[in-house]
Amino acid sequence: MYDSSASPASRPALLDVRGLTKSFGALTALQDVDFTLGEGEIHALLGENGAGKSTLIKVVTGVFARDAGTVRLAGQEIAPRSAGDALDAGIATVYQEVNLLPNLSVAQNLYLGRQPTRFGVVREAEMRRRAHALLLDYGLDIDVGAPLSSYSVAVQHITAIARAVDLSARVLILDEPTASLDRHEVEILFKVMRQLAARGIGIVFVSHFLDQVYEICDRVTVLRNGRQIGTRELADLPRLDLIRMMLGRELAETTGERAASQPETAREVCVSFKGFGKQGYLAPFDLELRRGEVVGLAGLLGSGRTETARLVFGAERADSGEATVGGKAVRLNSPRDGAGLGFGYCPEERKTEGIVADLTVRENIILALQARRGLHRPLSRREQDEIAMRYIRMLDIRPPDPERTIGLLSGGNQQKALLARWLATSPKLLVLDEPTRGIDVGAHAEIIRLVRELCDQGLALLVISSELDEIVTYSNRVIVLRDRAHVEELKGDAVEVSSILAAIAADVPAAQEVAS
């Protein structure tokens, strides 16, 4: 008999994962990971990019075959070979992008593949009656005959949850379910989660919003670099300790001296943003970027760092505030606008959003400059060769072969080629999103050196990094983000790891709510 009053750790294990290991070639994505979910427990699964959260979910649900380890559900070992097998066993997953059919009605989605029939004909009225009764249990009194697409994301999530539970799910995995919800919708979803937990269903909650984790979850398991760092009860876990578990080692004092900082008033403002934001995406922010200055963006994954970068460059269109360059208001409605203003952007996902893997190093380097010139002013082959070789030598891109396909280069050399692409345009502002992620130690040091040199040359830099000791090394100022809002700006002596951690972990509501 399920006892809701028992502590999370003492409840019977509903899902018990032991020694789970998964590799993809030479990459070990999971190494000897344990995870236990109790009956009626809401258990947070946290970790930064590449921590292994998605791999763990996909191995448990049969999307990936495990290399080692066991998965038990209610004491019985299971080995699902697909998400369908996992659902049949009693484990359902609802992803951020709801995996339903928006063109069908709510009722049709709820009973897809198991519609009530008579003599081979679907009983539409009976299906709608059942669907309406089912959703009333979740507090939704809606027209189930209407297309699913006509309802909010929150309603779509609850529909997906109701379908999964009605299919006898005993374990429910919610992967970033609140990422696109406003606060009211989050409250609706949390009410449903609490109802399900009270019925003994175990819920795994994957999220980047720590306020929500502390509000709804009983325990948390943290993964880092494919390993389990620990499982703790949230009631006994200070937020600062949780962040340290997620970000890594006890962050040591940064080695090497920081460059002497000029007063802000001594630097020319390159670009200024006032009340700049996008509803449901990033709360409005004020930000000035100055020549010869590095501004770091710090925060946990999902805090709004990349969203800030994309708004600044024009990859996302702001719906509030204004941007000015040289004191004049400018339009930033597209990447073309950003590039035309002299902005450059090296995205975090360099393989999918940065390089063109099948083109040569030369072709990748001249791409942005040629786009700025337009089709009617093509760069000659001689100009292309000169530009490519100049930056290959300057940035020490290896091998130093401009005709080598860039997809064959190491991650560090691909990153240098992306830097070269924008440096060739003589930018005013360069936005770097995780410039050192996924590259070897030597290339890492080279990228840090380049950031410092570019700053010395008068370029304005906006740099995102999850490595706090790294961001402290080269930043003149650090903007701390939480829950998709800019919450604190650190300057001068305040730019240190402990101050950034304290700002991230502050147990207070974000300074600004993302507009709903």
Image (cartoon, rainbow, N blue to C red):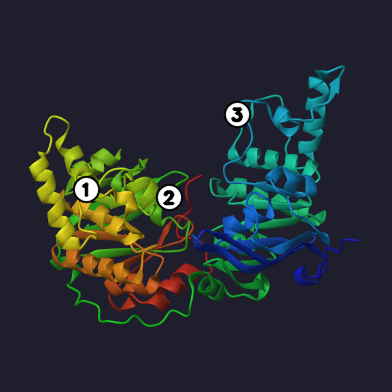
What residue is at 26 percent from the left and 53 percent from the top? 418
Indicate which disc residue 150 carries.
3
- Can you say which quadrant of the picture contains the N terminus? bottom right
- Between 322 and 347, the one lying in front of the other is 347
Q: Amino acid at mark 3?
A: Ser
Q: Position of residue 410 (x, y in %)?
A: 33, 59
Q: Position of residue 199 (x, y in %)?
A: 82, 53
> Can I make out residue 77 in this image?
yes
Say if 143 sits above or below 243 in the image: above
Q: Which residue is mark 2?
A: 282
Along the horizontal axis of the image, is 328 left or right of 204? left
Say if 307 sits above or below 487 in the image: above
Label 2: which secondary element: strand
Give the Cα separation between the discs numbered 3 and 1: 51 Å
Q: Nearer the viewer, mark 1 or mark 2?
A: 1
Q: Amino acid at mark 1?
A: Glu
What residue is at 69 percent from the left and 38 percent from the top? 159
Q: Label 1: few (<14), some or many (≥20) within 10 Å?
A: few
Q: Are marks 3 and 1 in contact (CB under 8 Å)?
A: no
Q: Nearer the viewer, mark 3 or mark 1?
A: 1
Q: Position of residue 96 (x, y in %)?
A: 58, 46
The image quadrant of residue 251 is bottom left
Say if 195 sits above or below 47 in the image: above
Q: Position of residue 148 (x, y in %)?
A: 64, 30
